[in-house]
Image (cartoon, rainbow, N blue to C red):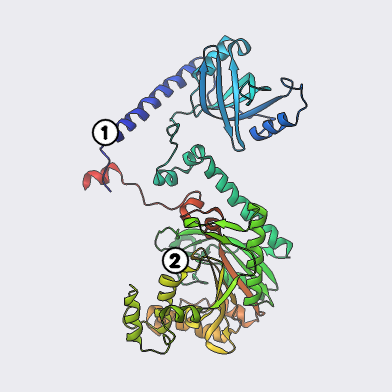
Amino acid sequence: MQKDNSPSSENELATTSDLRAQRLAKLDDLLNAGIKPYGHRVDDVCAAAEALAMFERSEEGAEGELRTRIAGRLMAVREMGKSIFADVRDQSGRLQVYAKKNVLGEDAFGLFKKLDIGDIISAEGSLFRTRMGEVTMKIETFDLLTKSLRPLPEKWHGLTDVEQRHRQRYLDLISNREVQELFQTRAAVVREIRNFLDERGFIEVETPMLQAIPGGAAARPFETYYAALDSAMYLRIAPELYLKRLLVGGFEKVYEINRNFRNEGLSRRHNPEFTMIEIYEAYSDCRGMMELVESLITTVAGRVLGTLEIQFEDETVINLQRPWRRVAYHDLVEERMGEDWFQVEDEERRKRGEKHGLHIPQGSSTAEATNEVFEKLIERTLIQPTFVTRLPAELVPLAKRCEDNPELVDVFELEIGGQEIAPGYSELNDPLEQRRRFEDQVQRVHGTAEEVSGRIDEDFLTAMEHGMPPAGGMGMGIDRLLMLLTGSPSIRDVILFPQMRPRQTPLDSNQK
């Protein structure tokens, strides 16, 4: 990364430095005048939106009689001689305020004139409607609660640099109202997910984030060290094996909204730290999970967005109306790569893959080659809600085999908007078969049987041997669901503080 030495960049840095120096000087003036620039608790604060609503509800003739107190950040100031109009913004919205010299008095009005955009104040006064029709507060008293020492992003253009928006999310939230609304939508979606599951009798639980053996998914974990136990530990890649222990223990309907960590790449759809919900229901199966996730997403979308039609890229509309399409994995692959795809030799599969721009390494199994086709060529085409069913058993070691074909497992992957939103299984509850699957998976990844020891969760297998009921289970990426529901193109847009590459320091730059 090269250092930006352009004149515009240098001028911007100089301007920021100069403005900060000016504000520090104002801070000294305040302190010398005995004014505390970092204030106190404010009681009986009314949200800006509620103040506006109260005024609209008030009867005709009540103008000037409705008094209230607000608190928020100054976002615009318009001086007009002996009066000042300003915008105060809080979490709920914006309210215009009006400061007049003969109302506040000379000293208080002088202080108000010295306020900067970005300062946080409280103000009390009466509401009225201006000649332009805007509901406004005539300030009778105010207090400075926080002196802002740095300028906010430029007034008209806001904060537009995508990387800066993600690195300094607080500025993004201040400058871009729609970003605040997006994360309020996120909170509402999570709340309605909980409401939906609670209404169906599920219990929310918590399971360990630090694990001695990472399990429940195939991914590279983050490793740490637990000094008190003198042992390596891992941040979880999935909560699945602990939630299944709860099925063994007699909890029949459980879910966890959890943070998972996977030591893998950054991309438009991947963040190493992400939020998922995992749900397990005893005596259910894959089809029960299909009904559950279909009902969950449509219910949440209806309650939060008020619609089941979602605007997607290129003016495409995703329709969440039920029922959703169900199609077998093999059928999709054969449709794209030829009806004889699963009968031809490995080399022929490699050649066909290369014609489509895929790299299928020598020695790849049929399942590995097919999954490359699915992930690179097929998944992105599945825009409308689609349950892809009956996947190769080799790819899913924790699911039951299909009764009519033991090479396949009774699972689904829910695809919407060209990406996986939720996988769901008829959960494997045979402990001996589960052990064989784990051993096969470890040997496939690490190459030798000797590597199996210490990589299999023996405690989980012991729990299973006590008897786990047949069950359906599913996981859903909350971040990806938010991308879908809000039309966000990147996972970073729906995570308040996404992972970013470390900034290059001046020392690093000079060394290069």
**Which mark is drawn over residue 7?**
1
Which secondary structure, mark 2? loop
At horizontal 45% and vertical 82% (from top left) the residue drawn is 334
Q: Nearer the viewer, mark 2 or mark 1?
A: 1
Q: Is residue 475 left or right of residue 201?
A: left
Q: Position of residue 108 (x, y in %)?
A: 57, 14
Q: Is residue 97 left or right of residue 492?
A: right
Q: Hey, which quadrant is residue 35 in on the image?
A: top right
Amino acid type shown at disc 1: Pro
Amino acid type shown at disc 2: Pro
Could you say which is closer to the camera, residue 348 or residue 506?
348
Q: Is residue 382 above or below residue 172?
A: below
Q: Is residue 433 above or below residue 460?
A: below
At horizontal 47% and vertical 65% (from top left) the residue drawn is 233
Mark 2 vs 1, N-terminal side:
1
**Which mark is drawn over residue 156?**
none
Q: How many residues crowd mark 2 within 10 Å: few (<14), some (14–19), many (20+)?
A: many
Q: How many residues crowd mark 1 within 10 Å: few (<14), some (14–19), many (20+)?
A: few
**Which residue is label 2 attached to?**
221
Q: Contact, CB < 8 Å: mark 2 with mark 1?
A: no
